[in-house]
Amino acid sequence: MRNIQIKDRFNRSTGRRISGIVLLLCLLLASCEESKRFEIGYSDTTKPGAPEYLRYQPTYGGARLYYRQPEDKDLLTIDATYKTRSGEERWFSVSYYAEYIDVYGFATQEPHTISLFAVDRAGNRSDAVSVVVEPLQPAVEQVASTVYCIGGFSSFYINWDNGLMQSMNVFLDYSYTSEAGVAEDKHLVYTSREATERQFVRDPQLSARTPVTVQVRVEDEYGNVSKTLQVGVLQLLEDEKIPKNEWQIPEANDSTIVNRNGEVVNTGVPMGFFDALEGRAYMAIDDIINDGTFVNFIHTYGWGRTGNSRDGNMPWNYIIDMGDYYELSRIITNQRYLSYGANEYSGRGDFYRNENVGTYTMWRWDDDIQAWDSISTNKITFPEGLPDRQYKILGFQGDMAYMYPENPRFTKPTRWFRFEALTSFSDNYTGLGANCLSEITLYGRKAEGY
């Protein structure tokens, strides 16, 4: 009986192994069959069937075409082409997995004819299916219609929407008369495919005494250009850098502050721990920006949240006692560049990478309600596709944000400011690995009567 049981278990075990081997061979064969679709040197002369056109959806400066794929075992892509007025052919292609194809770049809302066809892995094209579409307004005009500028503190910002997230060049021209009486004309170009974009214009000669005239035009990657938009004349606001000589910071894990009446209040939010590795807590307010030639930044090493235990990297809080009461207007933060050893050839370094802060919230202590008052949350724009030299310029310049970006103004008076780091730049601003910061600089004005 025992031998029979052993034999039975052996047979079942062997059967499972054989079944597993058969399944593995099937998967390998299927994989091999699929890989033949992309085989180098594959050749045949039989063209695939044409896609069956179903309908289209107009988009800004283009159209989205829906179709049914042809039954063809070696289908590779579905392609679409059209010709511009100058005779240039524009080509668009999607994988055979896709159910629609987007076509862009039309300069007018007039009807346009698109050729839709299938391509197999040997490069054979099917018969073309002609589709006439009427697009919405050109994408450059649509983006230009969303542009607006707001005058802020010795600076202004330009904002625009790009719903289709196409690559757009926004040309910004601004002019003003300097305090020396010299007419100044400046020209900037921003390239972006973000759905919503905001760019600050920081010119050292701008001030509240200098009205600025602004105009904008938009160009896409297909050479279409919008009309020039006269944004108007901006009147800027005036603030000043808050001196750091009276600033103090709490000890790690200290959640107390002294209110206006001289009372010690436990806020419930502890100062983080920033003395890990090379970092030192005071280095974020010493007016020295880390340039990679020496160590000058804070470092949490994962101890930043509560200040007394390594329970996770973020969020963490950096709390500043400004020594007096101020009305705040804006902030400039500087990222860590490199720990040490930098030279003129060091490239981008750590700028706009994981260990630096990508999003943060600003808070002020409100003596009236005896609680932290949320000012605003800021996301530092990650500039994509720039050369290393430009990343360095932006990183050393620092990242600026208004306390109230939609309506630039001063906060209510406060003595205590809290910087709450939320995420890093990684994983589309969801990463929790930001453990460094080089400098915090605040602007505003002295509060009267305090």
Image: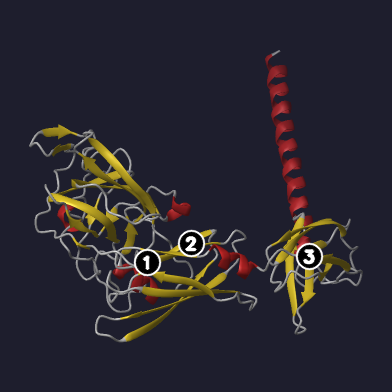
**Which residue ends up furthest to the left in the rendered image?**
262
* Quadrant of the image containing the N terminus: top right
Q: Which residue is mark 2?
A: 197
**Which residue ends up furthest to the bottom in the rendered image?**
182
Spot occupied by residue 46 in the image (x, y as percentages of width and height): 92, 69
Marks 2/1: CA–CA distance: 14 Å
The answer to whether residue 379 is left or right of residue 264 is right
Q: Which residue is mark 1?
A: 156
Marks 3/1: CA–CA distance: 38 Å
Residues tagged 3 and 2 counted as in contact (Cβ below 8 A): no
From this viewpoint, is residue 103 visible? no
Mark 3 or mark 2: which is in front? 3
| Badge 3 density bin: few <14, some 14–19, many ≥20, Cα 10 Å | some
Q: Which residue is mark 3?
A: 134
The answer to whether residue 49 is left or right of residue 301 is right
| Badge 2 density bin: few <14, some 14–19, many ≥20, Cα 10 Å | some
- What secondary structure is marked by label 2? strand
